[in-house]
Amino acid sequence: MRSYTLNIAGYKLRFQSSGDGPELIPSIRFLRSIIHDSEADLQINIHSGKYDLPENAERVFHAPYVEEVNGTLIKKQENFWSVWKHHSNLFIKTILPLASPGKNATLKFSLSSVEWDLWFDSNEKEVDPSEYPLDGLILYYLTVVNRDIMIHASGVNYKGHGFLFSGISGRGKSTIAMLWENAGAKVLHDDRLIVRNSAGTFTMFNTPVYNDDIPCRSSLEKIFIIEHGTENKLVEVKGAEAVSLVMANCIQHNWNPEIIEALLTTVSIMCSKIPTVRLSFKPDKTVIDKIVEYEL
C-alpha cells in the first residue's frame, strides 16, 4: 500500500509513501491499529535512499544496542541510534537490527511540525515504516510534542478502576499483570504505556509491542511503584518523592532541558491528582486481595 493511518494512544499517525518511495507493509502488531481516516495528527512521508545530515549537525544523544539476557543488559553494538540537531530540525539515525544486514533509516522532524520525513537507505521495494526501533522513537517524540508521558509500566482495569504498576526491569510488571488477568481484570499492557492528560483527566493507553496487541485504554486512578517482597505492603508517597519515583520509570531522552522540564511538569500535575503508592508484593494472588481491600 502507499499510505495508511494508525490510531495509537489516541494519536492519528499517517504514513505516506512519496512519489518514488517504497510500498508500505505494516507489521502484524500494527494491523489492529489501522483506521480509515483522512485526517491525521502527524504525517510521516516515506522515501527511498540515503539521507545526508547537514554538515554542521550536532549529535545530542546516542544509544548503544543492548539486549536483556536473564535480567542482565548486554551491549551488542556501540552504535544503534542517535539524535542530531541542526537549527530547529532534529534527526534520528538508526540501524534496523531486525531487518536485512546494513539496512538503516533517517528520520527528519521538528517538535513544532505535523509533517515529518523518513528515509530508508535500502534497495528494498517494501518497508515497514514502524520497524524497530522506529516505532518507539516516533511514539516517544509524539509524547514530547503533546506533553504526554511514555512509561515502563503495566496497566490494568479492574471493575472500572484503572491501576498503573511501574518499575524497572525485573521488578514484577509482567508478574502482576498476569495476577490481575487471572483475577478477571482487563490488562492493557505489561511493559509500555502512554499516559495522556485531557482537561485534568488522565488516561492510560497501550502501545503495539506484541503481535496480538489490540488498542485499549483506561482511566487512571492509582499509580503503584512496585518491587518484589516477602509480604504485601503499601505505602502512599506524595510530593517530590512521588514525582521522582514516577520520573525514574518514564522513557526520556535527557538531552534537551525544555523536554525534561515539560515532562517534569506533566508528571508533577499527574502526581498531584493521582495517588501514588509504593508496593512491595508477594508474587501470588494475595497481592490482588490486598489491593482490592486497600482500594475498593
Image (spheres, helix red, strand yellow):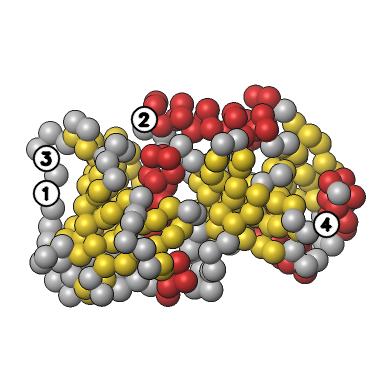
Q: Which mark is residue 256?
A: 2
Left or right: where does residue 223 sit relative to residue 212? right
Q: Residue 208 in the image: x percent, y percent?
A: 48, 63
Of 288 and 30, which appears nearest the observer? 30
> Where's the N terminus, which quadrant?
bottom left
Three-letter residue code for mark 1: Asp
Residue name at image x 39 percent, y 27 percent: 258
Residue name at image x 55 percent, y 46 percent: 195
Of labels 4 and 2, earlier in sequence is: 2
Nearest to viewer (mark 1 / mark 4):
4
The kind of secondary structure element at disc 4 is: helix
Q: Are marks 4 and 2 in contact (CB under 8 Å)?
A: no
Three-letter residue code for mark 2: Asn
Q: Residue 52 carries which label?
A: 1
Distance (Cα) linking label 4 and label 3 = 54 Å
The kind of secondary structure element at disc 1 is: loop
Residue name at image x 75 percent, y 52 percent: 161
Asked which quadrant contains residue 103, the reply is: bottom left
The kind of secondary structure element at disc 2 is: loop
Distance (Cα) linking label 1 and label 2 = 23 Å
Of labels 1 and 4, earlier in sequence is: 1
Asked which quadrant contains residue 225, the reply is: top right
Is residue 77 something one can see in this rendering? no
Of labels 4 and 3, earlier in sequence is: 3
Distance (Cα) linking label 1 and label 3 = 7 Å
Three-letter residue code for mark 4: Ile
Q: Which mark is residue 54?
A: 3
Q: Residue 84 in the image: x percent, y percent?
A: 24, 39
Residue name at image x 31 percent, y 67 percent: 4
Distance (Cα) linking label 1 and label 4 = 53 Å
Number of other residues with Cα within 10 Å of mark 2, as a class: few under 14, some 14 to 19, many 20 or more: few
